[in-house]
Image (spheres, grey):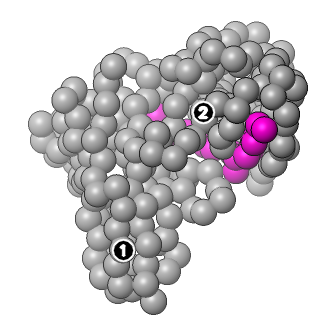
Amino acid sequence: NAGVTQTPKFRVLKTGQSMTLLCAQDMNHEYMYWYRQDPGMGLRLIHYSVGEGTTAKGEVPDGYNVSRLKKQNFLLGLESAAPSQTSVYFCASSSGTDRTGELFFGEGSRLTVL
Amino acid sequence: GQQLNQSPQSMFIQEGEDVSMNCTSSSIFNTWLWYKQDPGEGPVLLIALYKAGELTSNGRLTAQFGITRKDSFLNISASIPSDVGIYFCAGLSLGQGAQKLVFGQGTRLTINP
């Protein structure tokens, strides 16, 4: 009964370091998303994917890259971390049917960039 | 772009009280959704609304899709401690995929025992 799993849950980086967040879903969903959540800002979409091998930019894509090599996995990369990327990151997935607004979220990954 | 105005931003209530929160938009949405985020967790879908005027319940929660398609309301009756968290509304326009989902800024609910 895993649903959407994110790793790691917590990470502290120094400015300029790189890292990758992994998202895995076991619901055979076509669509996957990466959001960031900041105080008072709600959820903002970084990148998304509508299927294996596809990715697209969301609202706030700068400084991030993504890959979807396997249907069940969606990776979010930071090539050169900046303090402005300190945030809580959420991965989500959806089936891609007519009920596309119904998202399943992971538990979040809290990233601090010093 | 589209924005949702969610109010109130925070609520401090006593256990057992009823709660009301709402979302308004300058744009028309064809789907309204309400999510809840427990402390330290990801959001979880509470209620999805697909038809203007629709009133849907999920236990002590009741949500309505405004007849103008520009607003939605969420009510919680007889609040209990586990209702604590952040409640997000979200809207989606006709024909749009979930990448176009617009989220409100959230209502933080705190319950005093």
Q: Which residue matches tag 2?
A: A35
Residue B12 is tagged as 1
**Element carrying mark 2:** strand
Q: Residues within 10 Å of mark 2 (few under 14, many from 20)?
A: many
Question: Residue B78 occupies which quadrant of the picture?
Answer: bottom left
Q: Nearer the viewer, residue A65 or B64?
A: A65
Image quadrant containing the N terminus of chain A: bottom right
Q: Is residue B25 left or right of residue B106?
A: left
| In the foreground, B78 or B57 | B78
Tell me if residue A47 comes above or below residue B57 in the rendering: above
* Residue name at image x 45 percent, y 45 percent: A40
Marked residue chain, label 1: B
Question: Which residue type carries mark 1?
Answer: Phe
Chain of the residue under the numbered disc 2 shown in the image:
A
Is residue A108 depicted above or below A50 in this figure? Answer: below
Q: In this rendering, does residue B20 appear at all?
A: yes
